[in-house]
Amino acid sequence: YQELIRYRNEHGDFLVPQVYASNPTLGKWVSNQRQAYQRYLDNKPSQITPERIQQLNDIDFLWEPLEYKWNLQYQELIRYRNEHGDFLVPQVYASNPTLGKWVSNQRQAYQRYLDNKPSQITPERIQQLNDIDFLWEPLEYKWNLQYQELIRY
């Protein structure tokens, strides 16, 4: 627990990698806490107690790191749209290298979802993206822009 607090003080977050070279046992311990918490929530046998959950909640421990990271990228996408006026994030985007890849991953996951294939995207995330008028089909959008240019010509 104290090592976790030291990590947060040093790094500013609780995103301890599961394989953390500086403190290998910390990454595993954090992963174990998250797994135990999920078992607790699922009413399955768990090593975590309500008191330990409260201790971790008291320091604003991050129980869902993937959800947290998704939301960070979502906010970055909104910033991009506000700055550029669109959702045409280049896959290789120097200002934020992970954003272009994230956007591409969302589009691919959405297509898998539409095709009834296993997908990481949830209906809630699709709705979040739809709420900001996310562009799911950039090639179609670009084609239509060029077509409109041709008509104007």
Image: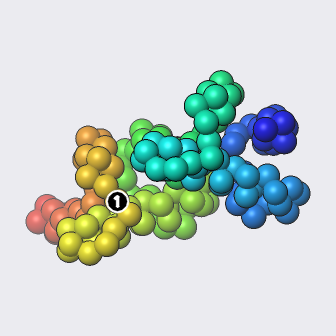
Residue 66 position, x and y percent, is: 52, 52
Q: Is residue 37 left or right of residue 25?
A: left
Residue 86 position, x and y percent, is: 35, 49
Q: Is residue 117 above or below residue 20?
A: below
Does the image show residue 136?
A: yes
Residue 37 position, x and y percent, is: 55, 44
Q: Which is more toward the observer, 91 or 6? A: 6
Q: Which residue is mark 1?
A: 121
Q: Is residue 40 left or right of residue 3?
A: left
Q: Looking at the rendering, which quadrant does residue 144 occupy?
A: bottom left
Q: Residue lying at the far top in this picture: please name it.
A: 58
Residue 127 position, x and y percent, is: 25, 46
Residue displayed at 84% across by 42% down: 3
Residue displayed at 31% across by 55% down: 122
Label 1: element kind: loop
Q: Which is more toward the observer, 37 or 85? A: 37
